[in-house]
Image: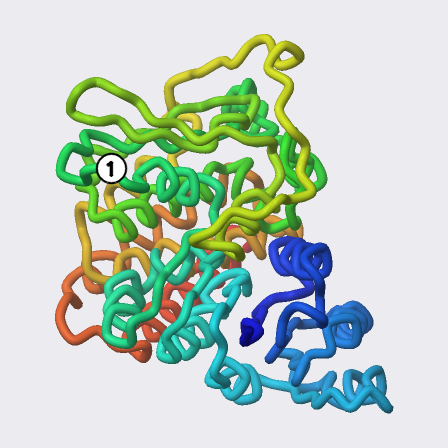
Amino acid sequence: MTRRRISIFGSTGSIGGNTVELLMHQGGAEAYDVVALTGASNIALLAEQARALRAGIAVTADPNRGAELAAALAGSGIASAAGQEALLEAAARPADWVMSAIVGSAGLAPGLCAARNGGMLALANKESLVCAGALLMDTCAAHGTTLLPVDSEHSAIFQALNGEDHGALERLLLTASGGPFRNKSRAEMAAMTPAQAVAHPNWDMGARISVDSATMFNKALEIIEAHVLFGVPPEKIEVVVHPQSIIHSMVGFADGSIMAQLGPADMRGAIGFALNHPARAALPVERLDFAALATLTFEAEDPVRFPALRLAREVLAAGGLSGAVLNAAKEAALDAFLAGRIGFLDMAALVEAALDSIGAEAASKRQGISLGDVMHYDRKAREFGNAWVAARRV
């Protein structure tokens, strides 16, 4: 039996680390042929993972850390490389299953490159679909690549739609935990610090994803992602706040039935589903005890306290490359907030200002979209965001 060839892009992050853990749980180097692992600044962890999985190559995105990675892998027989070109070369290596887990727009180029190899692309990088959804979907279709969503919400919808008549689909219901500030007023949120925003009540995630949850920009991106992945009109995509994070999302059908996917708040569930697709395998996750759960609650979305949701719907209405502006401005705002340069509520204000300034121009680009077009508006939005932050501090 031929062993599956696996690559993980962003293996040292939260999603990538969980993917490595599941590979080890399912036999590691004895069961899989690990083609490539990539990371950024955590060289020690990247080298440890590469040795454990006997990877063909380990790549750091940091061009200045190549020698450090090579030293950490000395004597292992594992190749190493550094920088953007090395990332793309690794992504071009044939693999049967690729995890795309590099955070932000930085994951777009490697993901597109991997999509050209066919096989399965497990997508945890939601920004790829927000910035360049049509481009990625068309690339997958042209090369026979199966795109498997790894966001827990979109994995839930993918599972709920399995075997169903898509023509009978009436609505998608994306669940949201509400984040750490679910019950805070806007006045209270204005004073929230990065440390408070990172403290997610349910999920163990990296700092950036946790802050995106606190602002609900993660849910904003997921609205756009759901539209691209499942071809559902924006008006049929709803957000429901579900603080317990047990129902990961739901699908409503024309007969009034609702199909929901439930599980513990553990990303290994969605990752493991994608890793073993189309089969299911035993995963080391908690089993739900419904008697102990007792109560599941739901609340309506609040686009006034969390304007990111409104901005996502405006971007979908505008179309074109306005999603690339939203995402890049959001990343610039997040960087500034984590650095203490702007306040919590300023993040949404910055994104809205960027869309007001650049969004219409980006929306007008609809045909023949290339990676270069996406990155052009990505740069423009970041430059706008940096200037906006600087002006606020004068």
Q: Secondary structure at mark 1?
A: loop
The x, y position of residue 163, in whole percent, is 28, 41
Q: Amino acid at mark 1?
A: Glu
Q: Nearer the viewer, residue 392 or 142?
A: 142
Q: Quadrant of the C terminus?
A: bottom right
Q: Is 306 rendered above or below residue 348?
A: above
In the image, is 250 to the left or to the right of 92? Answer: left
The x, y position of residue 340, in whole percent, is 66, 49
The x, y position of residue 265, in whole percent, is 60, 34
In the image, is 90 to the left or to the right of 227? Answer: right
Q: Is 390 rendered above or below residue 161?
A: below
Residue shown at the point (82%, 87%) measured from the top left: 76
The x, y position of residue 56, in whole percent, is 66, 84
Q: Nearer the viewer, residue 79 or 68?
A: 79
Residue 151 visible in the shown view: yes
Residue shown at the point (58%, 56%) measured from the top left: 335
Disc 1: which residue = 164
Location of residue 165 (image quadrant): top left
Q: Nearer the viewer, residue 226 or 183?
A: 226
